[in-house]
Image: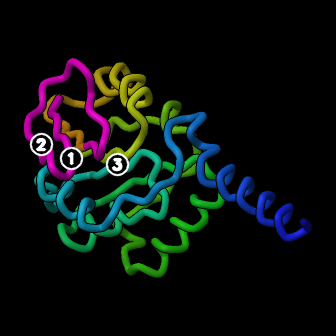
Amino acid sequence: MQLLIIFAVVFVLYVAWKYWTLLFGAGYDPTPMDKVRKMLTIAEVREGDIVYDLGCGDARFLITAARLYKARGVGIELDPFRFFFAWVVKLVSGQRRRVRIRFGNFFGMDISSATVIALFLYGPTNERLKSKFKRELRPGTRIVSYIWQFEGWELLESLPEDRIYLYKL
């Protein structure tokens, strides 16, 4: 009986840790690396781009963009543990000059310097972001989303089998 209680408590704590940020935009579910590479490719990331990852988790998208394409990256993370982890990953990745990790809620942060936005959020969160994107981003900014589409926005390109969607303002 005690073992069952311990298991239940650990399970509840794990689920709470993984998904509490769903209240703000998305739970934590790392984008598979093959999808990260495909997202960077479809968005045509290149040197000189400033890639923003909203809800950057472990910073894998930013580190990969910096390593493969010499792009600069800015990650925004609300969860303090994931923020710290992303910051440490950045330090040991050799990309500390190209990648910045910011702590906070991306809805309240300036993202206007982005040339590429990477998202693996939740459908309703993407919908809430539309007005922020239109207000803050420059024309031509590429937005690449994994799993969730933007209702009413015209797709520039997609990889339907991978559920990767590219838009351009």
Q: Residues within 10 Å of mark 2 (few under 14, many from 20)?
A: some
Query: Residue visible at 21% across and 64% down?
Result: 37
Q: Which residue is mark 3?
A: 52
Q: Residues within 10 Å of mark 3 (few under 14, many from 20)?
A: many
Judging by the rendered image, the residue that carries numbered circle 1 is 164
Tell me the SS state at disc 2: strand
* Marks 2 and 1 close (CB-CB < 8 Å): yes
In primary-sequence order, the first of circles 3 and 1 is: 3
The residue positioned 42% from the left and 45% from the top of the image is: 54
| 12, 121: nearer the viewer | 12
Which portion, as a residue range, is magenta? 145-169
Q: CA distance from mark 3 to mark 2?
A: 19 Å
Q: Is residue 107 above or below residue 64?
A: above
Residue 63 position, x and y percent, is: 34, 68
Task: Tell me the amino acid under the disc marked 3.
Answer: Tyr
Residue at image position (86%, 61%) is: 5
Question: Closer to the observer: label 3 or label 1?
Answer: 1
Tell me which numbered mark, 3 or 2, is placed earlier along the sequence. 3
Q: Which mark is residue 158?
A: 2
Image quarter where the C terminus lies is top left
On the rendered structure, is 11 left or right of 33?
right
